[in-house]
Image (spheres, rainbow, N blue to C red):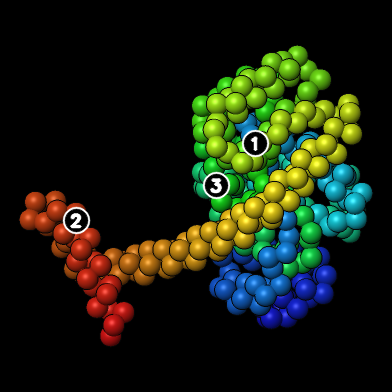
């Protein structure tokens, strides 16, 4: 099947085509670029909600309840659940899909687990491409659940429209989360498992820290959720909608998306530059000599970097 045929089937609502497209993107298939080109005009409509937090905070269970709330409003939901990479198969462990099994047969829900495959920012390397697939597939809301590595999960802020930071009142992870700088990326704080001891204390601590932030138009709400009270997840979704409306009303919606497009283009350019320079290093006999010159002190790394850039500029002008 050609990339155009696959894109056509996907746009017609073929779930197998959507699943195959994401698999091709994950595997780095050569037709990625043409596939993404075909899908691009049909993207940009979905509302992207990121869900991050420390391991054990209950992100997967929270995502499962959010799906139920969103589906009651008639909206289609796509879920990208980033799992740790299996050391044996290289794929996702699929723990998140097990917790969301109640939605497996719902045609208005598409759940995909993705392995990190060495990525350290909480997302898989092809998360952005998978989002584009689900957006073109017609998902109104896309929930992106990070892997749960803790303090380094900041990539989600560059992907999502709204970022939820999930805290667990019993694990003391809220203190570590705030120290890690995630305080700044949260649009909504979620105190999950709020029926456990420590939830009120966590809420006070978060609000106290928010009181120290000045000249901020949007104050992240602190929402308590618990599986024992399904209505609490409705309150969380309402907080997400308020943040989305705030972004649109303040003009930040388009600003964030423009920044995202700019970052994506720069990322593609940098990746292609790296690939071309690596190819030159692998094939050019001059590279070994340059390394030897650095080793003996004839040249320093900055001299060599300048020479590589000079070579690149010359080769592109030929």
Task: Name which of mark 1 and mark 3 comes first in the sequence.
Answer: 3
Q: Note whether 143 is above or below 126 in the view shown.
A: above
Disc on res. 302: 2
For this orientation, the residue located farthest to the bottom is 318
**Viewer-side residue, 165 vs 111:** 165
Q: Note whether 116 is above or below 225 in the view shown.
A: below
Query: In which quadrant will I find the N terminus?
Result: bottom right
Judge whether residue 79 can be spotted in this image: yes
**Viewer-side residue, 245 vs 258:** 245
**Residue depicted at 61% across the width and 76% down the height:** 37
> Which residue is identified by label 3?
155
Query: Dots 1 and 3: beta carbons under 8 Å?
Result: no
> Which residue is identified by label 1?
219
Residue 196 shown left or right of residue 263 in the figure: right
Quarter of the image holding residue 77? Answer: bottom right
Mark 2: give few (<14), some (14-19) or many (20+) Cα within 10 Å: few
Quarter of the image holding residue 195? Answer: top right
Judge whether residue 23 can be spotted in this image: no
- Label 1 and label 2: CA atoms lie apart by 45 Å
Query: In which quadrant will I find the C terminus?
Result: bottom left
Task: Name which of mark 1 and mark 2 comes first in the sequence.
Answer: 1
Disc on res. 82: none
- Label 1 and label 3: CA atoms lie apart by 21 Å
Of badges 1 and 2, nearer the viewer stands 1
Which element carries disc 1, helix, strand or loop?
A: loop
Query: Dots 1 and 2: beta carbons under 8 Å?
Result: no
């Amino acid at each position: 099947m050609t990339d155009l045929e696959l894109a056509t089937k996907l746009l017609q609502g073929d779930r197998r085509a959507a699943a195959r497209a994401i698999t091709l993107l994950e595997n780095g298939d050569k037709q990625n670029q043409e596939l993404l080109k075909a899908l691009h005009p049909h993207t940009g409509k979905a509302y992207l909600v990121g869900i991050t937090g420390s391991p054990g905070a209950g992100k997967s269970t929270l995502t499962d309840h959010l799906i139920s709330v969103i589906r009651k409003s008639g909206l289609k939901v796509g879920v990208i659940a980033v799992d740790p990479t299996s050391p044996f198969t290289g794929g996702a462990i699929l723990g998140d899909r097990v917790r969301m099994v109640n939605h497996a047969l719902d045609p208005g829900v598409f759940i995909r687990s993705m392995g990190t495959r060495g990525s350290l920012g909480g997302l898989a390397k092809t998360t952005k491409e998978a989002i584009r697939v689900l957006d073109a597939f017609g998902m109104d809301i896309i929930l992106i659940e990070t892997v749960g590595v803790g303090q380094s999960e900041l990539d989600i802020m560059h992907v999502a429209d709204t970022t939820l930071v999930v805290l667990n009142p019993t694990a003391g992870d809220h203190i570590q989360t705030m120290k890690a700088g995630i305080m700044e990326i949260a649009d909504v704080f979620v105190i999950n498992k709020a029926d456990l001891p420590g939830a009120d204390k966590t809420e006070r601590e978060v609000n106290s820290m928010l009181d120290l932030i000045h000249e901020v138009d949007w104050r992240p709400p602190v929402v308590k959720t618990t599986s024992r009270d399904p209505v609490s997840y409705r309150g969380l979704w309402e907080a997400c909608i308020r943040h989305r409306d705030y972004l649109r009303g303040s003009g930040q919606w388009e600003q964030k998306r423009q920044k995202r497009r700019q970052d994506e283009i720069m990322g593609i350019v940098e990746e292609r530059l790296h690939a071309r320079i690596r190819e030159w290093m692998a094939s050019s006999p001059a590279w070994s000599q340059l390394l030897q010159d650095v080793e003996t002190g004839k040249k320093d790394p900055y001299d060599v970097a300048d020479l590589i850039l000079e070579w690149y500029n010359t080769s592109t002008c030929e």
